[in-house]
Image (spheres, helix red, strand yellow):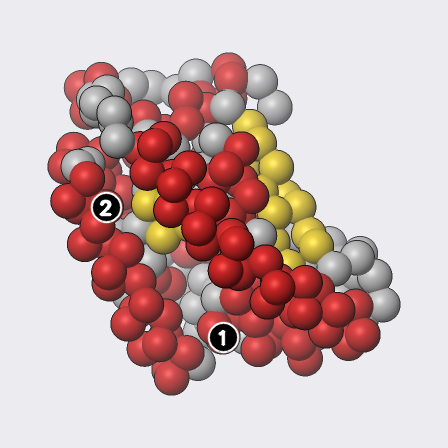
Amino acid sequence: MPDACLTRPTSRREAIVPDLWWKRPTDLLLGSLALLVALPLVLCLAIVVVLDDAGPAFFSQARVGVGGRPFRMWKLRTMRAGCEQDTHRLTAADWFTGRCTGDRYKTLADPRITRAGRLLRRCDLDELPQLFNVLLGDMSLVGPRPAIPYELDHYEPAYFSRFSVPPGITGLWQVSGRDRLSAAEMMELDLRYVREASPWLDLRVLLRTGPALLAAARRA
C-alpha cells in the first residue's frame, strides 16, 4: 500500500505537525524495559495459542502508520488459523457509519475466536508483541489506534490528521471506553491527542492504561 493511500480531501486540522522530541527516546527506554519483563509471558502464551489451535502463534496484519506509511503489526493469534477478514470489514463499516448491529466493534462472541483467544482478548494480552513494533519505530507506546487500510474508506477529511503522530499500543481511546465509544468519539480523541501531545499526556495515559484494562476485563 503506497503512501498515496492518504490522498484524500484535506482540512486545516491536517496541517498539525506536533513536535514529538520525547517520543523515540521514551519508546526505546520504556519499550525495552517492558519487553524484557513481558518476553517470558509472551513465549508462554505463544505455546498456549499453538496448543489450543494448531497454527502459528503470532498474527501480523497491515496497518497504517505515521505519514500514511504501511507496516506489519504483530499480535498473538486469537482466531482460528486461516480465518478470513470479511466479517471484520463489515463490522468496521457498520461502526464507522453508526449502524448498530448489536455487537461491539471488538466482541468476544465472534465464533472465529479460539478459547485461548478469548482469554487473551479479555486481558489485551494478545497485544504484547506490539512492543516489537515500538522498538522498530513503527509504533509508539502512546498514540492513536493503528488503522487498518480498509477503514480509511470511511474516514472524514479531518480524520487523516491522526497520521501526524505514530500509532500507539495505548492511547486516549483505549483509556476512555474503547469500543463502547462510537467511531466519531474515537476519532475526536485521536485528534485531541494530535493537538495536545506532550510527555505529560503520554504519562497520564500510561498510568491510566492498567486500571482501564482491568475494568475492561471485568466487563467482558
- Decide: is 49 above or below 37: below
199 sits to left or right of 86:
left
Q: Determine if residue 45 is in view.
A: yes
Label 2: which residue?
A: 202
* Image coords of residue 73 (percent x, y): 58, 42
Residue 192: image x %, image y %?
18, 41
Q: Residue 115, located in which quarter of the rendered image? A: bottom right
Tell me the SS state at disc 1.
Answer: helix
Q: Nearer the viewer, residue 212 or 220?
A: 212
**Residue depicted at 34% across the width and 32% down the height:** 25
Identify the residue at image location x=38%, y=46%. Answer: 30
Instruction: Tell me the quarter of the picture where residue 187 sits.
Output: top left
Label 1 to label 2, Cα distance in Å?
Answer: 24 Å
Q: Secondary structure at mark 2?
A: helix
Q: Amino acid at mark 2?
A: Asp
Residue 122's mark?
A: 1
